[in-house]
Image (cartoon, helix red, strand yellow):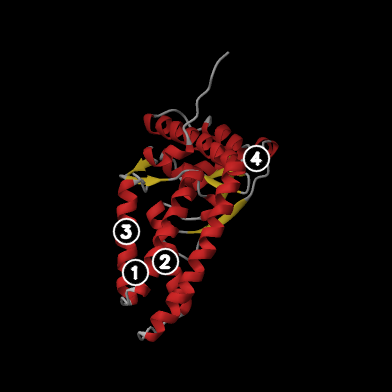
Amino acid sequence: MYAFFLPKINDFDKYYFWEENNVNKNLVKVNGDDVFTDSWIISEGTGNTHQSVVKHIENHIVKMKRLGELSDYLKCSENNNNIHIKVYNLNEMQASFLMTLLGNSEKVVDFKFELVRQFYAMRQFIFERQNKWWIRTREQGKLTRKAETDVLKQLVEYAKEQGYDHEENLLYINYTKLANKICGISNRESATSEQLSSLSVAENIILHCIQAGIQEEKHYKDIYRDCKQRLEIFKDIAYIQVA
């Protein structure tokens, strides 16, 4: 029996995404329970013009549609925002078929390798998201988030007494962004179980740091700085890597 090993989604930050001009780039995106790339990403990654990539797709559009629904979206031209370019979304099979039509220069081969790796890694992520551990971790995180939100309500009133006159939501947003950034999360619904566990700890730190700051009668801005400092320490101790 042969064993096929996939890169663990937990190790995503340990892998470098496709690097073009030293810029890390995620080549695939999750939509529901499926994974996609698009013709623009393939064009950039392989060095082909987008026009030529689209021509390959449209020359074989019947076969493409047999591999799944072929959707598209409009992207503003880089040279003129008034001009919109039609970009095709491609599922894994459609992208794999398209890649067979683009030749095998060294750049294309490197891109193919990374695209395949990211497709498989994202597939594993979707599987992980659906399992009971992810669901349980997410639900626990919601309870922690509720407790943190209750404390943030106290902070809003406390800050108002010190002259805070901005939108109340701004405080919530700032603390949410702080926790997400420390844990390397851009969207909580697409976070891994490991990231969600770290997030729960981070929000607990925020909760207790705010409570302590109010009790010590610190300025609300100093409370935020204390939270940020403690979260940075947590990040270092937990070896959290942010892409």
Q: Quadrant of residue 24?
A: top left
Q: Which residue is mark 2?
A: 175
Dot 2 surroundings within 10 Å: few (below 14), some, or many (20 or more)? some
N-terminal of the pair, mark 2 or mark 4, is: 4
The reply to whether callout 1 and callout 2 are in contact (CB within 8 Å) is: yes
Residue type at mark 3 is: Arg
Q: From this view, report whether residue 22 is shown above or below residue 232.
A: above
Location of residue 229 with respect to 62 vertically, above or below: below
**Amino acid at pointer 1:** Tyr
Residue situated in front as seen by the camera: 59 or 217: 217
Q: Quadrant of residue 111?
A: top left
Q: Residue at x 60, y 51 (%)?
A: 72
At x 43%, y 64%, the residue is 207
Q: CA distance from mark 3 to mark 1?
A: 10 Å
Residue 230 disc label: 3
* Number of residues whose C-alpha sits closer than 10 Å to that of mark 1, classed few (under 14), some (14–19) or many (20 or more): some
Q: Which mark is residue 224?
A: 1
Q: Element type at marker 3?
A: helix
- SS assignment at label 1: helix
The numbered dot on residue 61 is: 4
